[in-house]
Image (cartoon, rainbow, N blue to C red):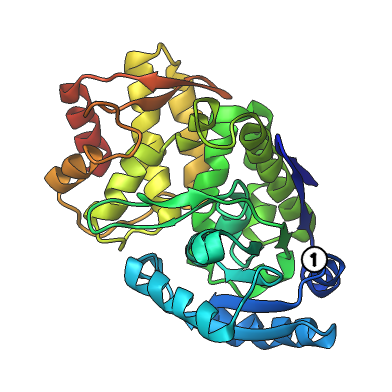
Amino acid sequence: MTVQLAERAYPVLIGSGALLELPRRLREKAVSSAVVVSDSNVAGEWGEAVLAGLTGVGIRSQLHAVQPGEQAKSLSELSRVLDFLEAFDLDRRGVVVALGGGTVGDLAGFAAAIWLRGVRYVQVPTTLLAMVDASVGGKTGVNSERSKNSIGAVWQPLAVFSDLTTLRTLPEAEYLTAFGEIVKYAVSLDRHLAGTLRHQAPALIERDQTALESVVTRGIELKAQVVAADEREAGPREVLNYGHTVGHALEIASNFAVPHGRAVALGLRAAARLGVECCGCPQSVVEVQDELLAAFGLPGDLPPVRENEVLAALLRDKKAREGRLRWVLPRELGKVQVGVRVPAATVERVVHEVLS
């Protein structure tokens, strides 16, 4: 698959064994050196194999491991990555390899965006969530003390290598959280995907490779189409924020104890209910969405979160204009409306309902 942008395009390789293509593809791009950024968990599983492949084709390579989890998306961790790039002497013929989940991709991609005013990087997502979400589209960045993804840049990868083999060792809870984002695509962009998820849920839960490749491919296709039309989120790309307004607020209020996919799932529940009240969305959309989420155990049991802290975090949403939230809400299955204004009292009531 190819992500086609206004000025260039890049490939997304999907399937078992896609990672084996990495060394050859980088060599063809005249890459001289590579820093592989990974978290300490993924590095132990895949780091040595990736390094061996790169050095095997003559690419000088070294691994830099960061702490696992959302806490790695910080300015202090970013500084350590940049220090490593400098010590390694990565020049503009080099490449940063983001090996891991969405946190690693965001962090490593942002480091690549600002090192030497921009060097190349590739995404090697090892979680289902990263494959269908963060690895495609070029959004990179870290969190500030008070908000999520507020420090960053749009910096497109050289290529994406989504090897389904890496999902075999993914813990079940982490694997299933990804379906929060996949259900988002179905409800906001593709009603046919909703039908596929409904019928294929048992196979997907069992990680059937055929079912998985089909759904991952469709999710990436949908995101790539949106990104191609609006690379820098000037307008149309905002559809991808469906479920993220409450979702991000929940992550922040819980100090990231709630995983992204589960937070988005709860955000979807809130947004669909607001859609019924504010956009004339049929109640049946809420029911279909709830059914799909429940099929994958979402949102599941969440740690205690203070409602007032979620509401406070909402006010810091980066999509807000002049202090007012702009919601992405469903109008029907497969279509959403961007920039909806919702009365504060309605937001407070619905947030209370979904958190109860």
Residue 309 vertical placement versus 81 (above, below): above
- Helix, strand, or loop for circle 1? helix
Position in image of residue 334 (x %, y %):
58, 24
Q: Nearer the viewer, residue 306 or 43?
A: 43
**Rendered residue at 53%/67% (across/down):** 172
Please tell me how many numbered marks the rendered image carries.
Answer: 1
Classify residue 168 as left or right of residue 134: right
Is residue 295 in view from this perspective? no
Which quadrant holds residue 260?
A: bottom left
The residue at the far top in this view is 280
Q: Quadrant of residue 74?
A: bottom left
User: Crowdedness of circle 1 by 10 Å Cα count: few (<14), some, many (20+)?
Assistant: some
Residue placed at 28% from the left, 28% from the top? Answer: 325
In this rendering, is residue 24 above or below 118? below
Whole-percent x and y of residue 135?
60, 55
Left or right, 3 with reference to 328: right
Can I make out residue 73 in this image? yes
Residue 256 against residue 22 in the figure, above or below: above
Residue type indicated by callout 1? Ala
Q: Residue at x 33, y 33 (%)?
A: 270
From the top left corner, tell me how far across and down residue 187 is, in percent. 54, 30
Specify the farthest residue to the left. Answer: 308
Residue 65 relative to residue 11: left or right: left
The residue that label 1 is drawn on is 18
Viewer-side residue, 139 vs 195: 139
Q: Nearer the viewer, residue 331 or 240?
A: 240
